[in-house]
Amino acid sequence: LKAWTRTKYVIATNSCTAALTVCLSFLKSVGYEMALVPALTYVATANAARFAGLQVEVNEVQGDGIISSFCHDNRRVPIPVSFGGRTCWLAGKGTIEDAAHSLGARRANVLASCYSFYPTKSITTGMGGAIATADQQLTVFSRQAIHQGMTPGPSTARPLCVQPGMEWRMTEIAAAIGRVQVKRLPQFLKRRRDVTSRYFTELGRYVPFLPIDIEGACHLVVVLPENRKRLT
């Protein structure tokens, strides 16, 4: 996963929601107060922020499903969502990318990216997630937070509890599945990209699609109807 995410550290968790919660809890601990969340996302993005103790501000997205900018300062955490497998290129030292859809796409220049290994994603561990970051302080915090706030003590039999935490580690069985799945990621991505390309080629003249990066993760192909209300 380090190779695929092109980053120094990867921390495996039992879900992407847990990964987001840990990263946002870290930023809460260093003074951030609010999370900036796009309207086009799954409820877990906002739930993770609230569970971490942050206020949530929901921001509208553009017609292509991407937020072009957040008002970023040292108390507000932008959470760009790489929707459908298309990387949201919103960088920042306090930015946490919700990359649940986008393992296999290029990673934005952010503090951390949080991935999902749910059965519908690029690879699966049954349930699982991961944090990808180059930040050592966040890495130490995350490894403790997902293991009841504990860090190894003088001996492995006597760990020390140094911060609040939960049991958010990936299970050994899930990790074993993931080791096999990640080897097949190139095959999975090729199939997704082939199918996506065919949708655009065969149907693009008839229906408008949300723009997508064909070299990305190609998680979703989204139709943009001219009159959405007629479909509901």
Image (cartoon, rainbow, N blue to C red):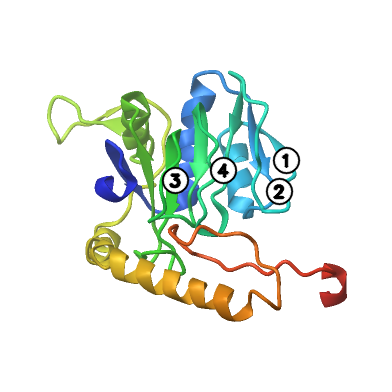
Q: Identity of the amino acid at label 2?
A: Ala
Q: Kindly report the distance in space between the C-alpha atoms of the residues bearing marks 4 and 3.
A: 12 Å
Q: Which residue is mark 3?
A: 114
Q: Which residue is mark 1?
A: 59
> Which residue is most to the bottom?
202
Which tag, 2 or 4, sits closer to the chain's start?
Answer: 2
Q: Which residue is mark 4?
A: 48
Q: Kindly report the distance in space between the C-alpha atoms of the residues bearing marks 3 and 2.
A: 18 Å
Which tag, 1 or 3, sits closer to the chain's start?
Answer: 1
Q: Position of residue 179 (x, y in %)?
A: 22, 61
Query: Mark 2 touching mark 4, by CB under 8 A?
Result: no
Q: Identity of the amino acid at label 4?
A: Ala
Q: Position of residue 208 (x, y in %)?
A: 70, 69
Query: Mark 2 touching mark 1, by CB under 8 A?
Result: yes
Q: Which residue is mark 2?
A: 39
Q: Position of residue 220 (x, y in %)?
A: 55, 66
**Quadrant housing the C terminus:** bottom right
Q: Identity of the amino acid at label 1?
A: Asn
